[in-house]
Image (spheres, helix red, strand yellow):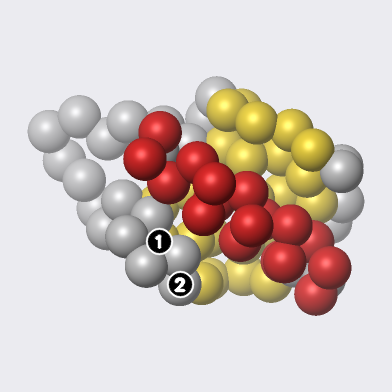
Amino acid sequence: MPTISRFFGIAIRMYWEAGNPHHRPHFHAYYQDYAAVFAIDDLSLLGGTLPERQMRYVLSWAREHRNEL
């Protein structure tokens, strides 16, 4: 999965599922030993967990970059 952004120790990763998508469009966020998956359309948490501060950072980043995702 290519890393598309890094900030505050958080890595955002995403990849293209050509021809066989298995989920709604989503991206992955990684921070230390934590990982979470977020839907692009409504930024809902699809799975995993992040510390509260990093969760706010990721959601803020996603709102700013949603059109690019």
Q: Is residue 57 left or right of residue 67?
A: right
Q: Secondary structure at mark 1?
A: strand
Q: Is residue 69 left or right of residue 61?
A: left
Residue 20 pos. (x, y %): 16, 40
Kindly identify which numbered label has been placed on residue 55.
none
Residue type (three-letter) at the residue carrying disc 1:
Ala
Kindly identify which numbered label has been placed on residue 44.
2
Q: Is the Cβ of the residue at disc 1 closer than 8 Å to that at disc 2?
A: yes
Q: Which quarter of the figure has residue 17?
A: top left
On-image quarter of the C terminus: top left
Q: Is residue 3 left or right of residue 11?
A: left
Residue closer to the observer: 45 or 57: 57
Q: Residue furthest front?
A: 64
Instruction: Report, in whole angstroms, how far the alpha carbon at label 1 lies from the one at label 2.
Output: 5 Å
**What residue is shown with label 1?**
39
Residue positioned 78% across, 44% down in the render: 10
